[in-house]
Image (cartoon, rainbow, N blue to C red):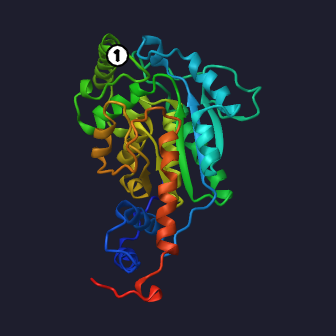
Amino acid sequence: MRTFNILPTDKDMRQAIQQKIDNLNKPKGSLGMLEDLAMQISLIQHTFTPTLSHPCHLLLGADHGIEHEGVSVSPRDVTWQQMLNFANGGGGVNLFCRQHGFDLSIIDMGVDHDLSACPQITNRKIAWGTSNFLHAAAMTEEQFNLCIETAVQLVDECKEKECNIICLGEMGIANTSPSSIWMSLFGQIPLEECIGAGAGLNNEGISHKYKVLKAAVDLYLENNRNTPLNAIRYFGGFEMVGAIGAMLRAAELHMVILVDGFIMTACMLAASQLYPNVLDYAVFGHCGDENGHKRLLLLMNAKPILLLGMRLGEGTGALCAYPIIESAIRMINEMNDFDRAHITKYF
């Protein structure tokens, strides 16, 4: 795997930024999370006047070999069908990107279907879905490295458009399974507490999913040294490893990273296992309704912006949070301070 140079944000600026925020004509701390977001983005961009430029959304799609074990209520055909739906502009991700002015890219990282005839979908197919990690690693080292390098190129293309805030979404039936395993391994949480209904499993389905994933984890631990890199490669999907690579490259380039629901939060947790400083660049859009998402966020001391009961994926929850981020930037740049407003500072 390539090496990333991810520096922590410059905390030496914190006091001066805080002073600017506190001098805005408002009671101290009265704009709550908006003040926290303004601080974080100012630190990321190393400026007292942060901006949001050409927001981009990368929607990464791929299939998972573990789907063959019946761990999802949805069949894998839904992955490619939804990818075509996104390409035609009919998904939730499409409407929110249109609403908030995001440049949407739809990328086939490993869908088990030929999508090459659709010009709206960028073909970066690593393989026709991952291997079934119930029996062996989901991907080879070569495939893992190709995922990371592909993601780096995708982020670099966004940067060339002068993008400084990037959102990541996913489409991949059964990708809650590797997410749950990463949550368990990285968070040292019992696996049964990390498994939820995904796209709609009933209690019997959840029990079956646990048995399959437990067997897969047992096989992995018997035959592999349990390191973050090994766990990511053994269980991850191409779209998930791609998201990790994109997060790491975006942090390296001092971009704001908008994190979506359970899957993308698991990817950020995995990325932080490799490079802890990546969390300085992460803005968590929402806490979703998937079992375990709240605990995932707590593992990173993350404070989500929204709590809307969402669990769609695609990046939709993060996109919905964007206007709040925009408000934070407007606050620090456009709000008068006490002197310019000729208001007596009373604290």
Q: Residue 324 at x, y = what percent?
A: 47, 56
Q: Quadrant of residue 181?
A: top left
Q: 40 above or below 92? A: below
- Does residue 226 appear anywhere in the picture? no
Q: Along the horizontal axis of the image, is 203 left or right of 267? A: left
Taking the spot 52% from the left edge, 14% from the top edge, the residue there is 75
> In this orientation, which residue lies closer to the viewer: 163 or 123?
163
Q: In which quarter of the image is the C terminus?
A: bottom left
Q: Residue furthest front?
A: 343
The three-letter amino acid code for the residue at tag 1 is: Lys
Q: Along the horizontal axis of the image, is 4 left or right of 346? A: right
Q: In which quarter of the image is residue 112?
A: top right
Residue at the disc numbered 1: 209
Q: 153 above or below 78? A: below
Q: Along the horizontal axis of the image, is 207 left or right of 20? A: left
- Crowding near the residue tagged with mark 1, few <14, some 14–19, many ≥20 C-alpha atoms within 10 Å: many
Q: Residue 259 at x, y = what percent?
A: 45, 46
Taking the spot 73% from the left edge, 35% from the top edge, the residue there is 120
Q: Residue 18 at x, y = what percent?
A: 36, 75
Q: How many labels does the image show?
A: 1
Q: Quadrant of residue 37?
A: bottom left
Q: Is mark 1 on a helix, strand or loop?
A: helix
Q: Residue 218 at x, y = what percent?
A: 28, 20
- Does residue 205 appear anywhere in the picture? yes
Q: 170 above or below 297? A: above
